[in-house]
Image (cartoon, rainbow, N blue to C red):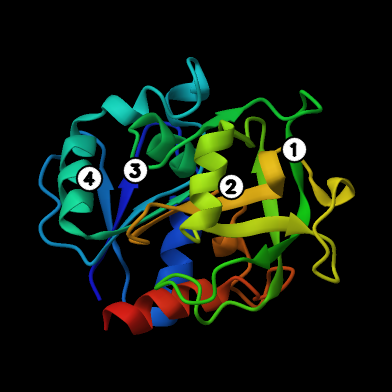
Amino acid sequence: MKASIILFPGSNREKDMAMALESVTGSAPAIVWHKDTDLGNPDLIVLPGGFSYGDYLRCGAMAAHSPVMKEVIRLAARGTRVLGVCNGFQMLVETHLLPGALLRNRSLKFMCKQVYLKRENATSSFTKNVGDVIRVPIAHGEGNFFADKDTLLKLKDEDGIAFRYCDSSGIVSEDANPNGSADNIAGIFNTEKTILGMMPHPENATQDWQANKQGLGLFETIVNTLA
């Protein structure tokens, strides 16, 4: 499987993502600078977390206009798998590859902690091998997912919700919602289920020295699907 991770000024999770992918595939993914316009023909494109362009405008808004994003959008329209995590999720929303918006956390504070996620779609090419409830970290200041009622209804009707924040037992509740996201949404798909955007960091739950390896199933699913 050929994977490309896009590196923007201010990205800080590209190495974490590369380690997660290499631990499953056995080979290092390509790191592509945001000014490059030729991605070749990757099986997977990853938009990693961080603070692209310092988040001086809306998070992900400036990165969405980087030269490489035209190629990302073109390949995504062709069906290439795209994974956007945290800042990468914000980019996917800013480019309208995914619906909704990501607002300031309800607390108005940056949050860095372990959370539990309930898998809401068990059939996608991203989530088949993910546990029903997994524990992974978040690290964001603008992770509050917002969408209007019609968009939320469409996401539900099309099984477009990938993950929701929950407690350790898998119960979705307001108490388990770390940032105020609508309907506890932590990750969503596009209609075709070829694009996944999520705020939590599964790549930081894949190594022996991390808190756990419960994020590994997501990367295993991607690789097995695209192999």
Which quarter of the rendering shows the C terminus?
A: bottom left
Quadrant in which residue 23 is drawn: bottom left
The image position of residue 54, as x and y in percent, is: 49, 23
Location of mark 4 (residue): 72
Q: Name which of mark 2 and mark 3 comes first in the sequence.
A: 3
Name the residue at 19% across, 31% down.
67
Residue that sits furthest to the right in the current view: 175
The amino acid on which the numbered mark 3 sits, given as a three-letter code, is Leu
Badge number at residue 179 = 1
Location of mark 3 (residue): 7
Asked if residue 17 is positioned above or below residue 179 in the image, the reply reads below
Q: Nearer the viewer, residue 201 or 81?
A: 81
Q: Name which of mark 3 and mark 4 comes first in the sequence.
A: 3
Badge number at residue 199 = 2
- Residue 170 is left or right of residue 155, and the answer is right
- Residue 69 is left or right of residue 48, and the answer is left
- The answer to whether mark 4 and mark 1 are in CB contact below 8 A is no
Q: CA distance from mark 3 to mark 4?
A: 13 Å
Asked if residue 143 is positioned above or below residue 188 in the image, the reply reads above
Quadrant in which residue 28 is drawn: bottom left
Q: CA distance from mark 4 to mark 1?
A: 28 Å
Residue 26 in sight here:
no
Q: Name which of mark 4 and mark 1 comes first in the sequence.
A: 4
The amino acid on which the numbered mark 1 sits, given as a three-letter code, is Asn
The image position of residue 83, as x and y in percent, is: 40, 56
The image position of residue 19, as x and y in percent, is: 46, 67
Q: Name which of mark 2 and mark 4 comes first in the sequence.
A: 4
Q: Name which of mark 2 and mark 1 comes first in the sequence.
A: 1
